[in-house]
Image (tube, coloured by chain):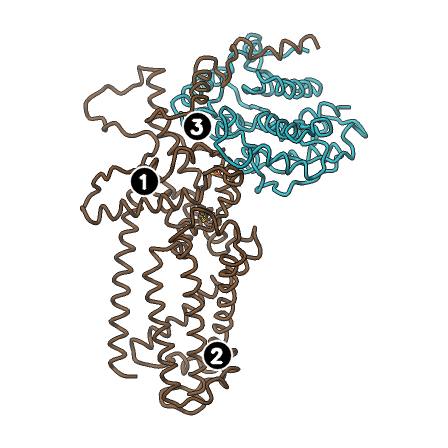
Chain colours: A brown, B cyan
Amino acid sequence: MHLVQQILFILCAGVSVYFFSKKVGEIRRNIKLGKDENLTDNPSARWRNMILMALGQQKMFKKPIPALLHLAVYAGFVIINVEILEIFLDGILGQHRLFAPMLGSLYAYLIGFFEVLAALVLIACVIFLIRRNVLKVKRLNQRELDGWPRNDANLILVTEVVLMSLFLIMNTADQVLQSRGAEHYTLTEPFWITSNFTGMFAGLSDGALVAIERGGWWLHIIGVFLFLNYLPYSKHLHIVLAFPNAYYTRLRPQGEMANMKEIQNEVLYMMQPELAPTADGSQPAQQRFGARDVMDLSWKNLLDAYSCTECGRCTSACPANTTGKKLSPRKIMMDTRDRLEEVGKNISVNKTFVDDGKSLVHDYISVEELRACTTCQACVEACPVGIEPLSIINQLRRYLVMEESNSPQEWNLMFGNVENNMAPWKFSPDERDKWAEEMVNS
Amino acid sequence: MMIKSMAEYAANGETPEVLFWVGCAGSFDQRAQKITKAFAQILDKVGVQFAILGKEEMCTGDPARRSGNEFLFQMMAYNNIQTMNAYGVKKIVTACPHCFNVLKNEYPALGGDYEVIHHTTFLQQLINDGRIRLKEGGEFKGKRITYHDSCYLGRGNNIYEAPREVLQALDVELVEMKRCRTNGLCCGAGGAQMFKEEEAGSTRVNFERSEEALETGANIIAANCPFCTTMLTDGVKNKEKEDSVMVLDIAEMVAKSLA
Ligand code: SF4
Ligand code: SF4
């Protein structure tokens, strides 16, 4: 291989890795804008979740057909990356099929196996494209996906199809060249799939074949570099973040809502003033109750937002959404990510966050959406990567009620009843055990 | 029958086997009162020594917390925990999954540590221990019945089998809805929705759920929650099926089947 190609390759690799790490650093910084939350307890249960949920895709199998297709793409993606390692080393060292002599006859099996995976990925992606664009599966065609999210999904599927095709074309041309004993093209055993298609290229000259093979190789690796840099901007970031996200997912019962220690203490001091710390001016500035913007959420909520695959399993299980309300738990996650990205850009430009007059509530997520949640946890249960849209909804609701006193009149009445009658309805507390008195006579 | 309060037990220097946490719906709502009475009747019949808090019981704070009013929740929780800790309460049974969830999962962080059991689990244990004896060929034998998983018993606390086992003990023909267990559809009441109008949409959540229940062709929809019971009853009425289809709490079904 020519030195020019080698230098070009190293340059491409360097640039792509540089931009990728820069963006990764920004995402890390953005996630750390969230509030502290300690989620390191019980590591064995956490590893278990990661292995079952992220690696084993346990929750995906609630819907077996998409689960199998997704498994093919996922396994293909992970395993074919081993081949990328060879391509990468070839590129740097100016070699061709570096591993072939080392692995001997095993090499053809390995590549054959990759080819089978590549074909499976190709087929699965085509089916996914059909499901999205022809069959128009409901959860893949809802309002919140209009525009960029829909293009994002299609773009990545098309890219996968192209990458896999290039890989297969490259191998086909390679084998024709091998059979002709062309220079550089190490003779290997026939590859399982592409060896059947060598006839397609039989009429071409060596030069044309080398061009196809090299072209395929270059486009493939450039595709990979572009993909790498596209990833952090896309819902496909989940292929990386699903793992940490599953690790840090909640272990407590889903029904449990997080306690607010600040308010617990305020109530305690109100009831037992003798316990209250004496004011010494060193108390922290008044904090906000509940969450108004992304910085008020916990870092796990923010990691959730970056891990969301926009698959809509949560939304299709949401009772509010399926009965036509505006609330969509997927949109909650997408909005959180969009706002966080906006805040991140603001910080990149201004060094620190400069108030832009916007917030996650109101500007991204409306009161109407938040109000419609029944806290049924169907979204949490449905999410294949352990995301909790409900946690964000609850925190935003706390902000609305406690900071903005923004609640429907019926809720205000309910609050009044709970406070004065110790029940959400307007009954006299004296009648609480009336049913028991009635039973005396029965 | 006499239902004693914690105060009465304490006055005699006694402690009951279990505290029956009635909850606001169970105490005040006319439909839910029937469930409360049915459950109390079962406890009395099988000789479980139980007490209620009576007038000392207050809302757990669940609707306040779920709607976002943490202050109010903390106040209610503080008072209830004070009361229960003063009586040295160890074990609680409740017929409301919302109370169950709050008492079991959310009070411990605030200093209220109790063994909390939902009434369907309690009934299942009493049946298994042979304390509840059921009629041979009772009223529900062979009846087509569907069971609605409440969110806070099911997904919230992973209790799916105990209520079904009670129904099996009643010899019913259990038919599942399309969405059941972890996929169960909400009745629409949770998250303090019970206390306000629904947002604009194409239908109501309880209508959708009731339709699904009716599709099974069941004559009885079995529930484990006073709020679900209300919501589903409304949904059945909306379809004008209230003459042929009943919504019953599992406790009511057991009470009617006692030997
Ligand atoms: S918890 Fe709220 S957002 Fe999640 S599925 Fe239930 S109603 Fe929808
Ligand atoms: S939150 Fe989970 S279930 Fe919902 S769209 Fe994102 S990945 Fe899918």
Q: Nearer the viewer, residue A4 or A262?
A: A4
Q: Position of residue B92 (x, y in %)?
A: 56, 23
What is the C-alpha distance between the residues marked 2 and 3?
Answer: 62 Å
Q: Nearer the viewer, residue B114 or B102?
A: B102
Residue appearing at x 22%, y 20% in the figure: A279
Q: Is residue A230 left or right of residue B119?
A: left
- Report the residue marked by disc 2: A106
Q: Position of residue A381 (x, y in %)?
A: 51, 43
Give the mark nearest the N terminus, 1 or 2.
2
Q: Quadrant of residue B175?
A: top right
- Report the residue marked by disc 1: A294
Same chain shared by disc 2 and disc 3:
no
What is the C-alpha distance between the residues marked 1 and 2?
Answer: 52 Å
Same chain shared by disc 1 and disc 2:
yes
Quarter of the picture holding the C terminus of chain B = top right
- Front label number (1 vs 2): 1
SS state under label 1: helix
Same chain shared by disc 1 and disc 3:
no
Residue type at the position of mark 3: Ser
Q: Position of residue A264 (x, y in %)?
A: 37, 24
SS state under label 3: helix
Q: Residues within 10 Å of mark 2 (few under 14, many from 20)?
A: some
- Report the residue marked by disc 3: B67
Which chain is indicated by disc 1? A
Contact, CB < 8 Å: mark 1 with mark 3?
no
What is the C-alpha distance between the residues marked 1 and 3?
Answer: 20 Å
Residue type at the position of mark 1: Val
Which chain is indicated by disc 3? B
